[in-house]
Image (spheres, rainbow, N blue to C red):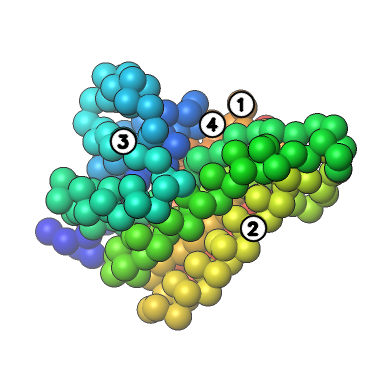
Amino acid sequence: MTTADLPAGPAGRVVLIAGATSASGRAVARALLEAGARVVAVGSDRGRLDELAAELPGVVTELADLSDQMQVWPLAMRVHARVGDVDGIVHLVGGWRGGGGIPGQTEEDYRVLERSFSALRHLSRALWDDLVASPAGRIAIVSSTTVERPTAGGANYTAIKAASESWMQSLAQGLGKEGGTGAAVTYRVKALAGLEDRLADQVVALWAQDAAALNGRVQTLEA
């Protein structure tokens, strides 16, 4: 049976979660596994990946620093060899640094935050052909409501989120040109803590919705 023959929903789909050992990553992984998806959990800490594998039997774990392009392409090849082509990417690589107004927006903080955007770029390029070939390719990220209301103390953080949203809209345009079966979706939150299960439900529902209606969507999640 190919993924084209599968019923609507994530059952049987291969979904890669970047930043999978976070609280939100664990919630999304659990929900996808319960819905019948084949989950690939990617993280940069072997110990936390082992804990996740023990907590969620059936999850496939992969160790990689997604901000390093030289690690992402080999990762893609390992995933293909272990579970096949990818139908979905859930990008949860993030973090927060800020404060101090504009003078406090240090280069060090920016470079740390930039890793999230680099990871998104590298991963979406490495698995682009998978998303296009899938009859239901999906990619989703979590952004911030500060993109609409930037502050001086969060300038570095919001700049990275805005860049990520722009990249997602470019992915959406590209997926729309490639047959219309794929979709790129952005979720904005004020703070992700407390919304992990809500996010997980939204991710599971991506495969039950029409790609054309989803593609390019920016949706705010609130408690």
- In the picture of the structure, the residue carrying the numbered disc 1 is 194
Residue 5 placed where, x, y %?
A: 20, 62
Q: What amino acid is found at the position of numbered circle 3 in the picture? A: Leu
- In the picture of the structure, the residue carrying the numbered disc 3 is 63
Give the spatial CA distance, label 1 vs label 3.
Answer: 27 Å
N-terminal label among 1 and 3: 3
The reply to whether callout 3 and callout 4 are in contact (CB within 8 Å) is no
The reply to whether callout 4 and callout 1 are in contact (CB within 8 Å) is yes
Q: Residue most toward the left? A: 1
Res. 154 image quadrant: top right
Neighbour class for label 3 at 10 Å: few (<14), some, many (≥20)? Answer: some
N-terminal label among 4 and 2: 2
- Callout in the foreground (4, 2): 2
N-terminal label among 2 and 1: 2
Give the spatial CA distance, label 4 vs label 1.
Answer: 6 Å
| Residue 119 visible in image | yes
| Residue 27 visible in image | no
Residue 196 circle label: 4
Classify residue 46 as left or right of residue 155: left
- In the picture of the structure, the residue carrying the numbered disc 2 is 163
Assign a secondary structure to mark 4: helix
Assign a secondary structure to mark 1: loop
Residue under the image location 52 percent in, 68 percent down: 172
The reply to whether callout 4 and callout 2 are in contact (CB within 8 Å) is no
Residue 65 placed where, x, y %?
A: 40, 40
Q: Is residue 207 above or below residue 215?
A: above
Q: Is residue 167 above or below residue 94?
A: below
Residue under the image location 75 percent in, 34 percent down: 98
Q: What amino acid is found at the position of numbered circle 1 in the picture? A: Gly
Assign a secondary structure to mark 2: helix
